Amino acid sequence: MKPAAAVIELQRPASAPGMPASIVRNFFATIAILVSCLLHPTSGQVADGSSRLDEIVQSALANRQFMGAVLVVKDGRSLLDKAYGFADMGQRRPNSVNTRFPVASLSKQFTAAGILLLEERGKLRTDDAIVKYIPNVPPAWRKITIRHLLTHTSGIPGSAPLPGLVGAKPFAASPTGPNDPAIDGSLEFAPGSRFSYSNAGYRVLDHLIEKLSGQSYAEFLQTNIFDPLAMKETGFGGDCKAGMKGASGYAPLWPESGKSVSAPAAWDLCSTTHDLLLWEQGLFGGQMLSQTSLDKMTTPSSAGYGFGLWITRLDKQTTVIYHPGNISGFSSAMAYVPDSKLYVVVLSNIDGTAAPRVQSQLLDVARGID
């Protein structure tokens, strides 16, 4: 059965002679947002003077391109801290600011930080060849360095299978890593000669963390990042769903039935907007890495990618450090502007480009808010 609000028929208002078309358009835009709010609840806070931020998200919600949670903080002041739509449409369970979402490729910055922590402890050097630590890599891999993997310049195809390294899952569960890789190992290009985004390359880094730390990837992040920063709502797989706090994933323009297209998988890293703010504040506030390591992480290559982060300029003076993420049913985006201490975190249980697009729009508007 369709929700009652879905069958509301909107009639064009009788317009007086010469009524501007913009008034009519604004009327329909307002009604669309009202109908969307009936279908998809919101909860949270909007700071005074920041209503434009909320309008941006409400517009994406009204167009059925977004559900999720959003947090915008500038120089210590929360401008928008709000959840939109449903975590589970079938159960009519709304999203909240404490809902956990899989973050997809946002996890790459945690991998990069883990590698740098191991370097600070003398376990590796980022300019070392990976063959030093994984001796039986395929011959074509022998010139690949850890830095190549971190900056997506290794030449390893993005979706390369890695049997014997991490199996079918991105993160191994054994204490020391299952086996060293024994695969074909053909590369798309010579290491260091080009940029090509590679999820498989980061899986090799995850394995390297396991091998050198003696912990699983999940255990290493928990003890070295999540616990020190008090990120209590961040974890993997089952943690995403525990206590009914996890979101189910949906496609854009979801059907009226609200059928989920995805739920968090066992290896998905999931988090909340509040926990990810703790991470960013800890990372850029010097609680996690030395300044030398942080400089390495945030120095862009020629392609604009650092270690697990994109770095670019919004204008001649303003740098933004960011990363999007997308998997079936979920999308995410996170950005930091150092000169104004502006943080924008957008987590969505709709896949596609909505979260990065909303994040970009919020970033532009928030920069102009005093």
Image: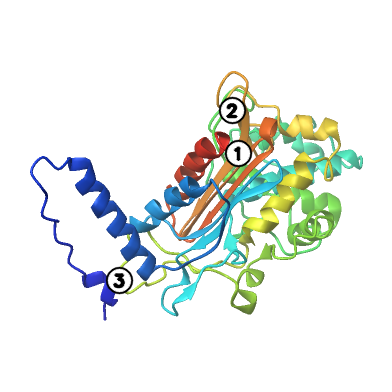
Which mark is first along the chain, 1 or 3?
Answer: 3
Horizontal side of 167 relative to 90 (left or right) equals right
Above-or-below relation of 79 to 262: above
Using a 10 Å C-alpha cutoff, classify the residue at mark 3 as few (fewer than 14 neighbours), some (14 to 19) or many (20 or more): few
What is the number of callouts on the image?
3
- Residue 146 drawn at (x, y percent): 74, 36
- Residue 23 drawn at (x, y percent): 22, 45
Residue 45, picture quadrant: bottom right
As helix, strand or loop, the secondary structure at mark 1 comes to: strand
Using a 10 Å C-alpha cutoff, classify the residue at mark 1 as few (fewer than 14 neighbours), some (14 to 19) or many (20 or more): many
- Residue 277 drawn at (x, y percent): 69, 51
Q: Please name the amino acid that badge 1 sits on.
A: Tyr
At horizontal 76% and vertical 30% (from top left) the residue drawn is 296
Q: Please name the amino acid that badge 2 sits on.
A: Thr
As helix, strand or loop, the secondary structure at mark 3 comes to: loop
Q: Quadrant of the C terminus?
A: top right
Which residue sits furthest right? Answer: 122
Residue that mark 3 sits on: 256
Quick one: 8 or 30, which is closer to the camera? Answer: 30
**Distance between the Cα atoms at labels 3 and 1?**
34 Å
Residue that mark 1 sits on: 322
Using a 10 Å C-alpha cutoff, classify the residue at mark 2 as few (fewer than 14 neighbours), some (14 to 19) or many (20 or more): some
Q: Kindly check if marks 2 and 1 are in contact, taking CB atoms under 8 A apart as contact.
A: yes
**Distance between the Cα atoms at labels 2 and 1?**
8 Å
The answer to whether residue 134 shows anywhere in this view is no
- Residue 225 drawn at (x, y percent): 80, 54
Q: Kindly check if marks 2 and 3 are in contact, taking CB atoms under 8 A apart as contact.
A: no
**Distance between the Cα atoms at labels 2 and 3?**
39 Å
Which residue sits furthest left? Answer: 17
Residue that mark 2 sits on: 312
